[in-house]
Amino acid sequence: MSRLMHVTSGPYAPPVAARELSAISSDGSRLHVEVHGPEGAPAVVLAHGWTCSTAFWAAQIRELARDHRVVAYDQRGHGRSPAPVGPAGYSVGALVDDLEAVLATALEPGERAVLVGHSMGGMTLMAAAGRPKVSEHAAAVLLCSTGTVRLAALSKVIPLKEGKLRTRLTRGLLHSRAPLGPVTPLARRILKYATMGPGSSREKVDACTRIVHACPRVVRQGWGRVLAALDIEANLKHLTVPTAVIAGTEDRMTPPDAARAIVAALPHCEGFTELPGIGHMTPVEAPDLVTAQIRQLVAAHVAVTRTEVKERA
């Protein structure tokens, strides 16, 4: 289980949950789930990315929980969700099974929500497209800074020209178990270069560095191997609910070309927003813009589906 090494005060500190739940996945894995905001309010479900945790969504939770019911969960091995026992627990299928368990635990039968995924969380939502237990709850989707295939080849984290050498080095980075060490000025500079835009504030860089460094290296490696081999491009045709996409122009991990490919393949694209000067950590770097997009999707799609649920009851 990850150490909870995140910011403890200020705007980047994660809010205290109204309720904490445990969701049990199909293989018995336990997932930490938090519920924020008033009962009966429109629902939003947040799925974080690789090496992150529910703390990553602090800004969205704090703002949305005023008038939404916000469900956030730790992907297996991250935050307060225990790590898988052995390599078999790391797979795209496991991510989808975990999402199904969270939705079944935190939402009422037939209740629809806006599902939001950042990076690996977005990959989880795309991989889950077409799964009946996910479709039952998905009113709309927001994908932030994510991709579907060839992640090692597309990544620009290694400062070399595109080609076999850069791809091989990036794949090695994804497979690495090297310790990240303490949060130091050098660690902040490295993380900022790899994952954030050049204009990111010290406070935002510090918050992200603390979250990422809290992820155990065996978990980072396990999911890094899954990401290096990821190919879920074919799933996009099954993502038929209204789906919006956000990408930062300075994203080195999943560059904007990855987002454009997703947009081109979506059956029902609700819009594509490119954020100038923003890197990979869009919910932290541009919190107001991401939160506003979530609110728009809720206003456009959740009210209707909640009425339909009541009519079916």
Image (cartoon, rainbow, N blue to C red):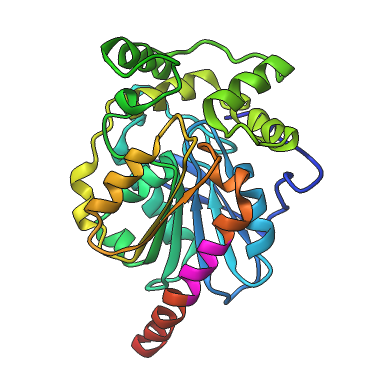
Q: Position of residue 199 (x, y in %)?
A: 65, 36
Q: Nearer the viewer, residue 148 or 160?
A: 160
Q: In the image shown, does 155 or 75 lie closer to the viewer?
A: 155
Q: Is residue 254 above or below residue 275?
A: above
Q: Which residues are magenta?
A: 292-299
Above or below, 304 against 21 in this view is below
Q: Is residue 135 above or below residue 143?
A: below
* Residue 220 x, y percent position in the rendering: 48, 23
Q: Magenta stretch containing residue 293, yes or no?
A: yes
| 28 on left or right of 128 | right
Name which quarter of the figure residue 88 lies in.
top left
Q: Quadrant of the C terminus?
A: bottom left
Percent x, y for residue 217? 52, 18
Q: In this orientation, which residue lies closer to the viewer: 62 or 41?
A: 62
> Looking at the picture, how far across and down is residue 109, in whole percent?
39, 71
Does residue 215 appear left or right of residue 15 in this picture? left
Prevalent SS, magenta region: helix
Residue drawn at 68 percent across, 55 percent down: 17
Residue at the spot x=41%, y=19% of the render? 174
Outermost residue to the right: 9
